[in-house]
Amino acid sequence: MAGAAFKTNPFHLHELLKDCSSGVLQLPDFQRSWVWDENRIKSLIASVSRAFPVGALMTLETGGDVDFKPRPIEGAPEAVRAVMPRSLLLDGQQRMTSLYQVSLRGSVVETITPKKKKVRRWFYIDILKALDSGTDREEAIIGIPEDKLVRENFGREVLLDLSSPEREFENLLYPVSQIFDWDDWQDGYNEYWKDEDKRALFRFFKKEVLESFKTYQLPVITLDRSTSKEAVCVVFEKVNTGGKPLDAFELVTAMYAADGHELRKDWYGDGKANAGRHGRFAAALKLADAEKGILAEVGNTDFLQVISLFHTRERRRQAEAEGKQGKELPQVTGNRQALLSLPLEAYLRYQIQAERGFLTAAKFLHMQHIYRVYDLPYQSQIIPLAAILADIGDDWEHEAVRAKLVQWYWNGVFGELYGSAVDTRIARDFMEVPGWIRGGQPPSTVSETIFRADRLKTMRMRLSAAYKGVNALLMKEGARDFRSGQGFDHTVFFGENVDIHHIFPQAWCRSKGLKPDVFDSIINKTPLSYRTNRIIGGEAPSGYLSKLEAGNASTPSISPLNLDTYLASHLIDPSLLRADMFDAFMADRQAKLLALIEKAMGKASYRGDVPEEGIDDELDDDGIEAEMTIAAE
């Protein structure tokens, strides 16, 4: 019987990264380029700093029958291209690239923000936060702009200056770019701080955090050079698109099973009369023509998160009653660690209340004219919405209470706050929004959010939360179909196959030499039925409006006055559309959409000329993946 053609050994992270830099370890050329965003990089740094496992690597020894063209890790020195690698990295490219670029390369890192902006970042570890056991380690990892200046008030004021080592010492922020070589930095730090307490602080930080990087080991599965090409292809496919990874729900299920409780049956049902929560959520407010209900994508860990929020809040309240303060108080959270510590008693106590919160959230979303999962701005925002509704109970039916909920919801959408790394935001909203409803201060999601007027021009991607938000607001405010004059309630929405379509058609725009970056923005789009969009076709607005007014054998004529009313319900100036005045139309509708958003958020937007940091990277659906990939050199 043939022996295994692989071996598994631990390797020090530092040695692996040096191999990447020297070209000893490279990528097979068919690997896609690095695309990790800023928050995932922070999470990776945090995990290594705590000596948490980040998964195994898989490599293939070169020199065998499998002859893949090698490619250096992104950012490796140019001379590495001439080096013949000893191994190719089959699995772990993004982790190794991220760690190499932030720690060993010594240069600013190109990455992508949750708003899909390409930016350049230096990464730092906040020494005090990293040593605070009550602070999530990810909160101690921060990204700083290329010039190492953090600005606020639209660039007018410098909030944080790390442009010199002395500023780093002063602010107790350690550069990740020196994570393996701290001697020079420590010498400068000790020269800056004569105080022995400050010097002792760094020594403790070095022991507790920095040494984790130097001693960190990764398990590496090495396929030897005798591995066949077929086997390598199968292995590569498995490690990239393999089965569902073990998640918190699976682990909690195993823990509860020891106490005789079948968590899986609660969620998935028994295949008979009990449909389980997953089935009940999928069916909640499911309309006849909808493929699935608005809660169909709520996951089992989403549900556990809501229960965890209630449980950890109760623990915090108990600690407060015992006289504990500050760092002694447990965090309110629904993060992975909290889920794995969620006792069965808490699950049983809060499960019914949490389910009611999600079912009420479905009603709330329908009231905002959000009917399909596809049109949901943020799936993640359902978690705090359900938790808040579960907490306030029937109070949400009062108009004044609902008005605050609506304002909070749209601030989250147009502030684009729920794109990634949302655990802290979810917990904060769960604590702050009910207090606001009961007469307290506005939550930070409301008080700290600012919408930029120029953002409307860059909303082009159908998957953008703000893009979907504008569409829902238009329907909520009474937009009526150009052809039928009907408002977009759920019956019309599904019966007429309503979606977002261009007002000035793409074909006409291209014929006039207009750029997609301009005519593909949400300013030139609006909800319309499928049949209406077919009539519009690719004609100039003046042409398709004439066709709508004239009617045909299957469509009655429409009076100009009525048609103008329908257009105005979409915040369109009929006179500009009838005259095919594209530029004037865009300026006028941008102002009206901005007023609509300001009304929903309950505050004025920023209309100044200080640009947002980063290069706009939001494209229509066809170019998303290609453009988000950082090209290999």
Image: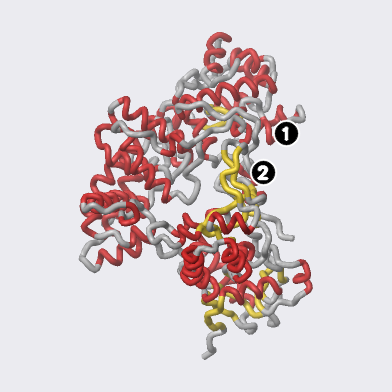
Q: Secondary structure at mark 2?
A: loop
Residue 219 or residue 31, whichever sits in front: 219
Q: Residue 354 appears at what percent x and percent y?
A: 28, 46
- Closer to the chain start, of discs 2 and 1, is 1
Q: Which mark is residue 425?
A: none
Residue projecting furthest to the bottom: 1
- The location of residue 591, given as percent across then percent down, is 59, 22
Residue identified by numbered label 2: 615
Observer-nearest of 67 and 205: 205
Q: Position of residue 501 (x, y in %)?
A: 58, 30
Which quadrant of the figure has residue 405? top left
User: The disc labelled 2 sits on which kind of residue?
Assistant: Ile
At mark 1, the secondary structure is: loop
In the image, residue 56 sits, relative to residue 36, either above or below, namely below
Q: Is residue 375 above or below residue 626?
A: above
Distance from label 2 to label 1 (Cα)? 17 Å
Foreground pick, 141 / 269: 141
Discs 2/1, front = 2
Is residue 252 shown left or right of residue 593? left
Q: Is residue 42 visible?
A: no
